[in-house]
Image: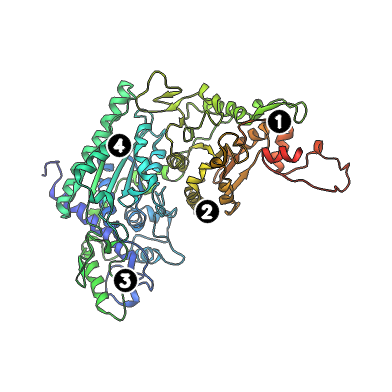
């Protein structure tokens, strides 16, 4: 027995399972036929165009195998968040071997024919992409655009006290602004009511053609950096497989036991103080287990392993032999039966069906509790005559949102996200029902801060707020992000990526609908009395207008009652990105609640009180949308 209680037999089985995932991952890159190498490899077995990435894949496979082990050992509720930009065949290989892929795609059977189809479809026309796309069971982070994995993971575990989100972060991804900011999300995680995030920083040394920053600084500097962020880093480093399996198994046990100990002490003692959560730093060669040297150029452990390590060329027949040698180095005959099934002794390493990361319902819309919403008409303002009274639309909306918080307090399925702007955006009333969640030191003069609250508003990062909201709704809960119109541009691309996710997810029968991504913008381009030119940029609405209406909906309510009706509609909706642009300044009010309800239902209408056509053809039609254009048009 080893020092951590693992027998040689278990270590050998872990290594064999890892070889199986590496074999299938390599085969997905290259093969369209002959997936078990039952005959010599030929050019007819190879895809005509090789598109994909190898460098991150063996490290991810290594992680997944060890996560499976601790899921079984500790009876865990865990999801896998794939952060590295490419290497999507790693989660595909693993969810295939665990049996989940076949459950969702019954034509991709667990045999030779199914394996052939699995390989052919990867990065192939009409097949699947090279990322952890929506088609991949268990995925909530595609990874095509880098930087969002950790914020998605944190959003997923909010109000999910049993969930652990294992988040693999590529060392290239770690250089992005959104990811660098996301390390601070541990300051917002409540150890009693929320789950845990286990970041696994995968240092394989290289990006496309450059070294990575975090892999080239000293271990002391890296350790100081991560500890400065508030983490407790554990290191697994090397390249010799058997030693690495032992290191990883020992480390995984330690970090899972530390997470459980943190949660038990917090929950037993009702102590919500911020702990120092564990994380893992895994240092392995890029393209581990792949070709080491080709034509006197180093491949494994260099940037050359990033994409396709061996380019296949009919002009160079030796390339096909090199690929065959690489595939055979995993000894598939020891891993699969002649029918193409994973051998039973290796299948035993797979968690029970209800615990497999690819099948976890949290990653497929969550275990949803419908949002309870009061009747918005009860929050309406009295408008005896158009333009007769003045109100702040957002302040009126705040009273409605306050009570959405109240009625869902027990369900804990609604949150408000924003970059330090709740009061600026006139949402004062929400703090009558809740506080900002801030699991950090609190001083006597701080306002509306506590370790437990429904508002994530204390981090001045649009990226982090947006990413956490996405993780929250992707796992079946409800919420919205509020911000200034000009500065929401910072997350243009994030929202674009989410729109792509929704488009693809709608086409996948087994993907459940998810609550809409709701974005509420104020401080808009027309209302910059003191901020001026720096705060004027209506580009976000332009950005969304280029997207399809079956995903994007845009609302410009002209007054408070219309804003109430609009928000009520949006917060209940599913599978949309809803953009609401509203006023926070004192403005004339035009419609009573019944008129507003009808106007919003129609989407466009004629305001008779402002018309003088007397039922004949008008001489001029003035059209507008939004509070300020409406005011100017009426004037």
Query: Which structural element holds mark 3?
Result: loop
Tell me, yes or no, whether the two marked residues, 3 and 1, touch with CB atoms within 8 Å: no
Residue 64, image x, y percentages = 29, 50
Per the image, the residue denoted by label 2 is 503
Question: As displayed, is residue 31 above or below residue 12?
Answer: below
Residue 20, image x, y percentages = 26, 59
Query: Which structural element holds mark 2?
Result: helix
Residue shown at 46%/29% (left/top)?
454
Residue 496, image x, y percentages = 50, 51
Tell me, yes or no, whether the two marked residues, 3 and 2, touch with CB atoms within 8 Å: no
71 and 225: which is toward the camera? 225
Distance of label 1 from label 2 (alpha carbons): 39 Å
Per the image, the residue denoted by label 4 is 229
Which mark, by number, is residue 524?
none
Which mark, by number, is residue 588?
1
Instruction: Say which quadrant the N terminus sits in.
Output: top left
Residue 626, image x, y percentages = 67, 40
Question: As displayed, is residue 280 above or below residue 506?
Answer: above
Per the image, the residue denoted by label 3 is 34
Crowdedness of circle 2 by 10 Å Cα count: few (<14), some, many (20+)? some
Of the residues under marks 3 and 2, which one precedes in the sequence? 3
| Viewer-side label of 3, 1 | 1
Of the residues under marks 2 and 4, which one precedes in the sequence? 4
Residue shown at 55%/31% (left/top)?
425
| Viewer-side label of 4, 3 | 4
Position of residue 235 in the picture relative to residue 375 (left or right): left
Question: As displayed, is residue 509 above or below residue 280?
Answer: below
Crowdedness of circle 3 by 10 Å Cα count: few (<14), some, many (20+)? many
């Amino acid at each position: 027995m080893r020092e951590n209680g693992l027998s040689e037999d278990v270590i050998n089985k872990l290594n064999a399972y890892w070889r199986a995932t590496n074999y299938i991952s390599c085969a997905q890159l290259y093969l369209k036929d002959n997936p078990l190498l039952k005959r010599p490899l030929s050019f007819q077995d190879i895809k005509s165009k090789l598109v994909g990435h190898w460098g991150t894949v063996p490290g991810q496979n290594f992680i997944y195998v060890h996560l499976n082990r601790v899921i079984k050992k500790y009876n865990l509720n865990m999801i896998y968040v794939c952060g590295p930009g490419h290497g999507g065949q790693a989660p595909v290989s693993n969810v295939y071997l665990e049996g989940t892929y076949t459950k969702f795609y019954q034509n991709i059977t667990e045999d030779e024919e199914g394996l052939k189809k699995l390989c052919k479809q990867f990065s192939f026309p009409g097949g699947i992409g090279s990322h952890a796309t929506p088609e991949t069971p268990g995925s909530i982070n595609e990874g095509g655009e880098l930087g969002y994995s950790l914020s998605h993971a944190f959003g997923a575990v909010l109000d999910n006290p049993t969930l652990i989100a294992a988040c693999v972060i590529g060392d290239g991804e770690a250089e992005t602004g959104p990811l660098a900011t996301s390390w601070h999300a541990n300051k917002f995680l409540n150890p009693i009511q929320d789950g845990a995030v286990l970041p696994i920083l995968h240092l394989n040394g290289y990006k496309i053609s450059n070294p990575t920053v975090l892999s080239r600084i000293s271990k002391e500097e890296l350790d100081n950096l991560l500890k400065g962020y508030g983490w407790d880093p554990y290191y697994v480093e090397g390249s010799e497989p058997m030693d690495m399996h032992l290191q990883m198994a020992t480390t995984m046990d330690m970090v899972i036991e530390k997470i459980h100990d943190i949660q038990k002490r917090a929950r037993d003692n009702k102590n919500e103080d911020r702990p120092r959560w564990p994380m893992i730093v895994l240092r392995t060669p890029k393209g581990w287990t792949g070709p080491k040297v080709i034509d006197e150029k180093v491949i494994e452990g260099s940037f050359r392993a990033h994409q396709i390590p061996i380019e296949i060329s009919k002009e160079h027949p030796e390339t096909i032999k090199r690929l065959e040698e690489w595939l055979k180095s995993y000894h598939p005959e020891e891993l699969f039966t002649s029918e193409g099934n994973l051998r039973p002794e290796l299948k035993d390493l797979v968690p029970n069906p209800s615990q497999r990361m690819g099948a976890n319902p949290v990653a497929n819309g969550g275990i949803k509790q419908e949002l309870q919403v009061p009747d918005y008409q009860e929050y309406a303002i009295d408008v005896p005559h158009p333009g007769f009274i003045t109100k702040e639309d957002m302040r009126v909306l705040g009273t409605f949102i306050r009570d959405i918080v109240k009625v869902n307090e027990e369900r804990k399925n609604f949150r408000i996200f924003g970059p330090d702007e709740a009061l600026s955006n006139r949402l004062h009333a929400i703090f009558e029902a809740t506080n900002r969640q801030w699991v950090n030191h609190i001083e006597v003069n701080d306002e509306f801060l506590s370790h437990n609250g429904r508002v994530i508003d204390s981090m001045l990062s649009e990226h982090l707020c947006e990413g956490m909201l996405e993780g929250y709704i992707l796992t079946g809960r409800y919420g919205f992000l509020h911000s200034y119109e000009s500065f929401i541009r910072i997350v243009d691309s994030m929202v674009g990526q989410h729109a792509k996710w929704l488009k693809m997810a709608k086409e996948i029968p087994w993907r459940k609908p998810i609550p809409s991504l709701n974005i509420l913008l104020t401080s808009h381009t027309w209302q910059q009395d003191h901020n001026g030119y720096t705060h004027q940029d209506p580009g976000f609405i332009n950005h969304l207008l280029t997207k399809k209406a079956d995903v994007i909906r845009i609302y410009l309510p002209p007054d408070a009652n219309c804003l109430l009706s609009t928000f009520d509609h949006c917060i209940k909706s599913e599978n949309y990105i809803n953009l609401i642009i509203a006023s926070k300044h004192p403005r004339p009010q035009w419609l009573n609640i019944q008129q507003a309800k009808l106007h919003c239902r129609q989407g466009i209408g004629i305001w008779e009180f402002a018309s003088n056509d007397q039922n004949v053809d008008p001489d001029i039609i003035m059209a507008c949308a939004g509070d300020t254009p409406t005011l100017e048009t009426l004037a």
